[in-house]
Image (cartoon, grey):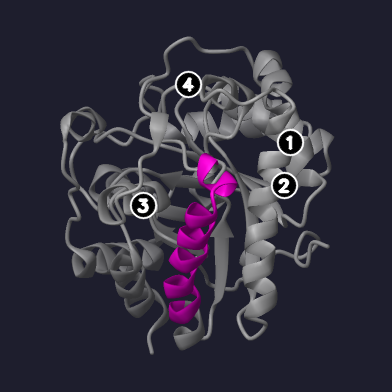
Amino acid sequence: MPLHRDSLPQLNNQTVLTDGGLETVLLFQKGFELPEFCAFPLLRDEEGRRAVAAYLDDYLAIARRHGVALLLESNTWRASPDWVARLGFKDSDTADINREAIDLLAAARASNPDVTTVISGCIGPRGDGYVPGAAMTADEAQGYHRTQVEALAGSEADLITALTLNYVEEAVGLARAAGEASMPCAISFTVETDGRLPTGQPLGEAIEQCDNLSPVRPAYYMINCAHPTHFAAVVAQGDPWTKRLGGVRANASTKSHAELDEMTTLDEGNPADLGERLGALRKDLPQLNVLGGCCGTDHRHIAAIAEACCGG
């Protein structure tokens, strides 16, 4: 059963670390093939399941060392109907894949009772993570994401986190689907090097629009798949909407999305510098309770973030 769905630690002023960039670690460091950058097929392979389980151990150890909570994200960023079908699975497999991913995290939580572990069901965009492409209306997005949301709502997931959203209508649809399923959700936008969404919309405007158009507002908002240098100046202005920001999952690299798309090797950035930047950001925005990594980050980056933001 969900342990924290009704009382999320990050909403009770507790620091919650996340893992790093699961897909980039598995692809570039562990040598797994991830067709279409999808990690969920590993759930159907014993070696893949062992690799995902082993990946979690480093982050559990960091959270334990610093005495803070840990948010574990399911490897279902692309386990929505279009991507499941694209990889040759049946439509009916979507719900099972999402539940299997949560079951794996629940097993890790049960094996580590000394670490307060929040389980998040991860949902990604229907299209490309960096390019808005063929955008849906909010109603279309609500209908599209409903299958994945409902599967996660019926699992041990404590919340849903929608990562790397790049236009506001999809965010609204996801928030509506989560509200319909009585699931708390975090909406995480990605931004370009100017701190704006890939559509050009200001981040604050997108957050306010999503709040205004969602009958049940998201629990909080996040920024992910961007380096702090891309958005620090925007959030440091202290506008009212920044109070709705509850977390950051930062990229290791300072490069733009377009530059990252062209790379064939992994830019691991500077873990210590990343930690210091998130620590400085948290001084301006003390409600940033969810802190972690995205593409290019691994346990070294999360350790540096923990040192800068949690001490010890």
Q: Are marks 1 and 2 in contact (CB under 8 Å)?
A: yes
CA separation in Å, label 1 and label 4:
19 Å
Residue found at x 67% / y 42%:
98
Q: Which residue is mark 2?
A: 99
Point out the tag, 2 or 3, that comes first from the N-terminus. Answer: 3
Question: Residue type at mark 3?
Answer: Leu
Q: Quadrant of residue 103?
A: bottom right
Point out the tag, 2 or 4, that comes first from the N-terminus. Answer: 2
Q: Position of residue 11 (x, y in %)?
A: 66, 63
Point out the tag, 1 or 3, that comes first from the N-terminus. Answer: 3
In front: label 1 or label 4: 1
CA separation in Å, label 2 and label 3:
21 Å
CA separation in Å, label 4 and label 3:
21 Å
Q: Which residue is mark 3?
A: 26
Point out the tag, 4 or 3, that comes first from the N-terminus. Answer: 3
Q: Position of residue 142 (x, y in %)?
A: 71, 23
Q: Which residue is mark 1?
A: 95
Magenta region's main secondary structure?
A: helix
Residue found at x 78% / y 31%:
215
Q: Which residue is mark 4?
A: 127
Question: Which portion, as a residue range, is magenta?
Answer: 41-62
Asked whether residue 49 is drawn in magenta, I would say: yes
**Residue farthest along the bottom direction in this orientation:** 312
